[in-house]
Amino acid sequence: MKDPPIASSPENASVLRPDFHWGFATAAAQVEGAWNADGKGESIWDKFSRIPGKIIDGSTNADATRAYDLYKADVQLLKKLGVNSYRFSLAWSRIIPLGGKDDPVNEAGLNYYSNLVDELLANDITSFVTLFHWDTPQALEDRYGGMLDQARYIADFERYARVCFTALGDRVKHWITYNEPGVYTLAGYAAGVHAPGRSSLPGRDDPGDSSTEPFIVAHTELVSHAHAVKIYREEFKPTQKGVIGITLHGNFSAPWDEDDPKDVEAAERALQFEIGWFADPVYGSGDYPACMREQLGDRLPHFTPEEKALVQGSSDFYGMNSYTTLYVRHRDQPADINDHKGNITSHDTNKAGVSRGAESATAWLRSNPAGFLSLLHWIWNRYHTPIYITENGTTAKGEEDWDPTSGFWLDDTFRQDFFEGYIGAVADAVRNGVDIRSYFAWTFTDNWEWAAGFTDRFGGSWVDFESSEKTRYPKKSAFELGRIFEHLIRKEAGVEARWCSVQ
Ligand code: GBH
């Protein structure tokens, strides 16, 4: 695999469409704080983060970056960085504190999001809104086990979606139902390292069944996503005229030994288990991949004919989150009962000893633009659906030690190179016929990184978590992104004016 030319290369000038969306992405539970302010109900992450031992640094998300209080200043920072779009998620329990279809709506919670959307609009920034980024209302977990109860959960999610479309859909034209359903289900119900923390893996003393629950929860996510889309398309889209879809996670998998057909097959199988699990039902065959059925049998739910009809075609775009590439090797033994990766092992180096990429500050993440490019083509060839890249980014070594009083700018060369490489891959894919319509860097500011607490700094701005104002200090890469997209996005009459107005 060879890296494509970097984003700033001359041949990439003006390769992106004039209406290309670029900006930063965030998630409510990672930035808002104000976990119980103005009537907000508890989410599963509010509860989970208070359980000793669950979060690496013992932190909770009670305050996070205080984006709830500081949203006006944040929008000014976004404007200064020159973005044309911003992706954020809604906290369900802020809008419906108890979550259920018959539970009261919290107008103060809705107002917060309405104000945020207005503030963005006033600054010429387009909102991309995610309904669900992992923070299920705790009350639904307590009432019926959340997504494990498909029928009750779907009714509640439908009502929540309807409330959001009604309140915000006049101004929000880009909707994402779920963020990374696969990560929610695997980290929450297989490994149990994310809320709600269910796992039957050896050595765990938790409720749950890692061999069945992840597949049940995934099914609930897919079907409830499709119900929300049906509601949007039938009741709102005719007047509001927006688009709606789902965002899936996915790494690229490359064979450990390119000359071993079993490793080549294992890498393809890994992609189908990780990505095809959700994408095939929505964008492809309308069913789970055959290799999953073969390995999992009836532990993998079956789509009823009605569900299949509902799920297939239920996304206007392919929402793509991707960070890294892994080398994948086949196993000769039968798959473990708790396996959900396609009976493979993943590796940091291939057979020849080549590393899967330059190391970030995060163990699972290494920089590999060539793998990202291959993944863009894999997704495009398999699903033929316009791609919105909704998350991509990295941590960088040493940032936790940066001193905001040093008088020096945080010159994050590792992240700048990462963006040059990965966005170069975006440009290369577009030049070769892949339809890509957005790029959101993960993430706007350093934030609360789930089980990693405040230890992983993915931000375009460095945050002083010790300060009461959670002061933001833009890193150099955040400004470099503006320069890169200035180079890449084609200017056309009308669009040009809008673009310039946000510089
Ligand atoms: C995204 O998930 C999320 O959408 C976002 O909220 C998150 O903050 C961001 O990435 C950065 O992490 O530690 O070996 O168990 C990306 C998918 C899935 C990647 C869980 C890390 C844990 C690997 N993530 N995975 S490990």
Image (cartoon, helix red, strand yellow):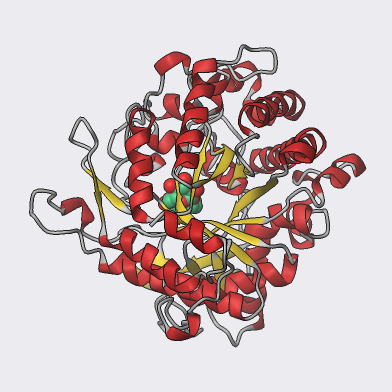
Q: Residue at x 48, y 59 (%)?
A: 499
Query: Can see residue 202?
Result: no
Q: How many marks?
A: 0
Residue 231 vs 484, above or below: the answer is above
Q: Residue at x 80, y 39 (%)?
A: 238
**Left or right position of 471 against 121:** left
From this viewpoint, which residue is outermost toward the right? 305
**Left or right position of 180 against 47:** right
The quarter holding residue 302 reads top right
Q: Where in the figure is residue 331, as x and y percent of width and height?
A: 60, 68
Residue 256 vs 272, above or below: the answer is below
Q: Where in the figure is residue 332, as x and y percent of width and height?
A: 63, 70
Which is more toward the observer, 8 or 295? 8
**Left or right position of 456 against 103:** left
Q: Where in the figure is residue 421, as x and y percent of width and height?
A: 42, 74
From this viewpoint, which residue is outermost toward the left? 406
Query: Can see residue 228?
Result: yes
Residue 85 vs 334, above or below: the answer is above
Q: Residue at x 55, y 68 (%)?
A: 252
Which is more toward the observer, 9 or 46? 9
Quadrant of the rendering where the C terminus is positioned = bottom left
Q: Where in the figure is residue 185, as x and y percent of width and height?
A: 59, 42
